[in-house]
Image (tube, rainbow, N blue to C red):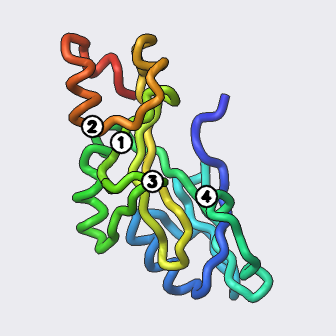
C-alpha cells in the first residue's frame, strides 16, 4: 500500500537558504517559482514543498512542521556522522538527552532527529522487524541495547 512519502509541505523564511539546506541533504529541485519550491525526495515518487511568505508564518505546532525521510537501518546507524559531514547537528527527541539514533520496539521503527534552518523538525527513520516479545516493551532503545537484546537472532532478518 503506502511505500513512502508522497509529499510534505513546510513554511520557510528564506527560500534560497532552504533550497541550499535540502539539496545538501541530497534532494533535487523539481519545480520552483518566486515563493515556492518542490524538491524530489524520490524522483517521480515523493517531494517536499517549501513555501516562503508572510501567509505561511502562522503559529504552527511542531507536529505539523515535521517530515520523516525513510532510510535503511545501516544508514541510520551512520546518520550522526553523515549529518556532521553536512554541518548539521542532531537534536534529542522529546525528553531524551541523547541525540543518538534510537529504536521504538513497540512501534517497530528507529529514528534520529534534526532541524532545518527554519526550525522544522526532520527525522531519518527506518522500520525494524521487532520480535513479538519486544513489541510489548514500550521503550526507546539505543542501537547497542537493541542489538544486544537480539543476540542469537539473525540481524539481517530483523532489519528492513
Lower sequence index among marks 2 and 4? 4
- Which SS class for mark 3? loop
Lower sequence index among marks 4 and 3? 4
* Left-right relation of 155 to 133: left
Cα–Cα gap, marks 1 and 4: 26 Å
Q: Residue 80: horizontal and vertical position, in percent?
A: 27, 57
Instruction: Classify 10 Å Cα crowding around label 4: few (below 14), some (14-19), many (20 and above).
Output: many
Front-most of residues 88 and 51: 88
- Which SS class for mark 4? strand
Q: Residue 103: horizontal and vertical position, in percent?
A: 38, 36
Q: According to the image, label 3 marks what residue?
A: 95
Lower sequence index among marks 2 and 1? 1
Q: According to the image, label 4 marks what residue?
A: 47
Lower sequence index among marks 1 and 3? 3
Front-most of residues 51 and 77: 77
Lower sequence index among marks 1 and 4? 4
Front-most of residues 71 and 141: 141
Nearer mark to the viewer, of 1 and 4:
1
Labelled disc at residue 56:
none
Front-most of residues 59 and 73: 59
Q: Residue 49: horizontal and vertical position, in percent?
A: 65, 67
Cα–Cα gap, marks 1 and 3: 13 Å
* Left-right relation of 84 to 18: left
Amino acid at each position: 500500500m503506502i511505500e513512502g512519502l508522497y509529499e510534505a509541505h513546510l513554511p520557510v523564511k528564506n527560500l534560497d537558504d532552504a533550497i541550499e539546506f535540502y539539496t545538501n541533504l541530497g534532494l533535487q529541485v523539481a519545480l520552483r517559482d518566486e515563493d515556492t519550491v518542490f524538491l524530489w525526495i524520490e524522483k517521480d515518487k515523493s517531494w517536499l514543498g517549501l513555501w516562503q511568505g508572510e501567509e505561511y508564518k502562522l503559529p504552527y505546532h511542531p507536529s505539523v512542521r515535521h517530515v520523516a525521510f525513510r532510510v535503511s537501518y545501516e544508514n541510520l546507524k551512520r546518520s550522526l556522522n553523515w549529518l556532521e559531514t553536512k554541518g548539521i547537528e542532531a537534536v534529542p527527541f522529546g525528553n531524551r538527552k541523547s541525540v543518538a539514533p534510537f529504536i521504538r520496539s513497540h512501534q517497530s521503527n528507529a529514528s534520529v532527529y534534526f532541524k532545518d534552518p527554519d526550525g522544522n523538525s526532520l527525522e531519518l527513520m527506518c522500520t525494524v522487524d521487532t520480535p513479538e516479545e519486544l513489541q510489548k516493551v514500550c521503550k526507546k532503545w539505543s542501537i547497542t541495547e537493541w542489538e544486544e537484546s537480539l543476540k542469537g537472532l539473525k540481524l539481517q532478518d530483523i532489519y528492513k
